[in-house]
Image (spheres, rainbow, N blue to C red):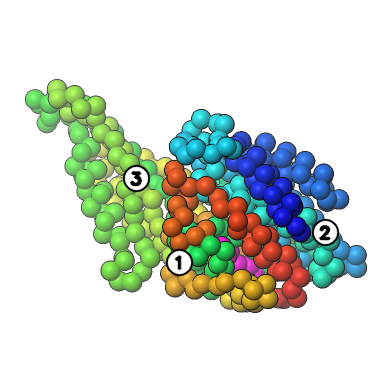
């Protein structure tokens, strides 16, 4: 495809960027994807309610094991603070993780695949909702497995690396995580007679210390808890408060390790509540499984990058943010790979971030080359 095509893909990405939608609300993104595909390809996007699937089956490919590619659609609850001609038109919401670029790259790949005689197997393209909350991947992954998909791939843009460089790891590439909030309730009292009430402050402090003990980084393990919020009282000097909350993000290299962390903190909360005469409750949010790449799929990514002449970098350590692509690799062979934004490019989730349009041909090219390859199984 010529420069005019990639300019059109970048314009499509900018349109998505200007109209961001939070997790589970990606109605406009679905419509824009459907409209672009209908005007540029003969492919039809099937609407499954909260997500889209596109099937491309070359002549004579029926019965061959399908391959699949996934792009996420949701934006973040972050204000657009940089000046862009296509900046977010939605207050408090912006594409600060690059999912607009992920969608644009997969749409570009759809346009390319339709004219590629080297692809000899069915291809599914999935546009998934709610990656940021970990809620969208499971249903899409299960559906692909039901269609007999044997391989699945996705990419994420990654800052701090050479622009256009392709990176992939075998095994765990992004950890499991979840959010936990513990709420404690006792009785408020006058600050002059705190003994007449039950203040959760000592419990919150001990929960913080318990979370710190879960950190295994000094032992060379990816396991730690991050305190992301704590509330207690109203800063009124006459009141000893009776309610308090503390929230953690738990992160571990294995799903089992994450479950153990959750169990330990839950046990600590229960014992402390009994000890200090409080009631306790727990809420779990945003669960993500570990994303574990199959070594064969990772090697196929490397081979595809070599064939295309793309620069490759090693990833000696996992990328610590979580990704719900782990749902896909639990059900079929696959890999999540990365494309570098640039060594000094702002990181995803940074208010100064915007997707780098120059890496769109790299990501789309990787999808097409992977589709051309022989089935792994």
| Residue 288 visible from this viewpoint | yes
In this orientation, which residue lies closer to the viewer: 138 or 52?
Answer: 52
In this orientation, which residue lies closer to the viewer: 100 or 219?
Answer: 100
Please give the residue where the numbered disc 2 appears in the rendered image: 114
Give the mark nearest the N terminus, 1 or 3. 3
| Vertical side of 218 occupied by 190: above or below | above
In this orientation, which residue lies closer to the viewer: 337 or 159?
Answer: 159
Residue furthest to the right in view is 60
Query: Which image quarter is the C terminus in?
Result: bottom right
- Residue visible at 30% across and 60% down? 214
Foreground tag (1 vs 3): 1
Secondary structure beneath label 1? loop
Give the crowd class for mark 1: few <14, some 14-19, many >=20 residues within 10 Å: some
Rendering quarter of residue 335: bottom right
Give the mark nearest the N terminus, 2 or 1. 2
Q: Given contact means CB atoms under 8 Å apart, are the residues at marks 2 and 1 in contact?
A: no
Secondary structure mostly seen in the magenta stretch: strand
Please give the residue where the numbered disc 3 appears in the rendered image: 228
Secondary structure beneath label 3? strand
- Residue visible at 84% across and 61% down? 115
Please give the residue where the numbered disc 1 appears in the rendered image: 318
Rendering quarter of residue 142: bottom right
Magenta residues span 332-339
Residue 262 is inside the magenta segment: no
Q: Position of residue 82 (x, y in %)?
A: 47, 39
| Residue 280 visible from this viewpoint | no
Foreground tag (3 vs 2): 2
| Vertical side of 307 occupied by 9: above or below | above
- Gap between marks 1 and 3, in whole Å? 22 Å
């Amino acid at each position: 495809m010529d420069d005019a095509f990639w300019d059109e893909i970048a314009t499509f990405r900018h349109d998505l960027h200007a109209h961001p939608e939070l997790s589970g609300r990606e109605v406009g993104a679905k419509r824009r994807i459907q409209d672009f595909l209908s005007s540029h390809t003969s492919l039809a996007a099937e609407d499954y309610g909260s997500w889209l699937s596109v099937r491309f089956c070359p002549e004579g490919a029926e019965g061959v094991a399908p391959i699949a590619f996934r792009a996420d659609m949701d934006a973040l609850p972050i204000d657009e603070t940089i000046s862009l001609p296509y900046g977010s038109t939605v207050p408090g919401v912006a594409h600060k993780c690059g999912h607009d670029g992920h969608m644009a790259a997969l749409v570009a790949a759809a346009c390319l695949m339709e004219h590629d005689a080297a692809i000899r197997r069915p291809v599914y393209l999935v546009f998934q909702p709610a990656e940021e909350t970990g809620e969208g991947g499971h249903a899409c992954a299960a559906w692909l497995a039901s269609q007999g998909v044997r391989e699945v791939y996705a990419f994420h843009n990654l800052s701090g690396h050479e622009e256009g460089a392709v990176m992939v790891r075998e095994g765990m590439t992004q950890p499991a995580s979840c959010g936990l909030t513990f709420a404690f309730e006792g009785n408020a009292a006058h600050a002059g007679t705190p003994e007449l009430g039950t203040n959760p402050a000592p419990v919150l402090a001990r929960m913080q210390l318990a979370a710190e003990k879960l950190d295994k980084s000094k032992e060379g393990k990816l396991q730690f808890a991050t305190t992301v919020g704590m509330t207690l009282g109203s800063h009124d000097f006459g009141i000893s408060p009776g309610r308090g909350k503390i929230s953690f993000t738990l992160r571990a290299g294995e799903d089992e390790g994450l479950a153990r962390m959750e169990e330990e903190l839950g046990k600590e909360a229960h014992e402390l509540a009994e000890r200090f005469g409080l009631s306790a409750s727990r809420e779990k949010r945003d669960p993500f499984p570990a994303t574990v790449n199959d070594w064969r799929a990772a090697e196929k990514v490397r081979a595809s990058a070599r064939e295309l002449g793309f620069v490759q970098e090693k990833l000696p350590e996992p990328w610590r943010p979580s990704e719900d692509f782990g749902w896909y690799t639990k059900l079929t062979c696959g890999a999540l790979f990365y494309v570098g934004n640039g060594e000094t490019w702002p990181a995803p989730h940074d208010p100064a971030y915007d997707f780098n349009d120059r890496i769109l041909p790299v990501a789309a090219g990787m999808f097409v080359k992977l589709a051309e390859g022989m089935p792994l199984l």
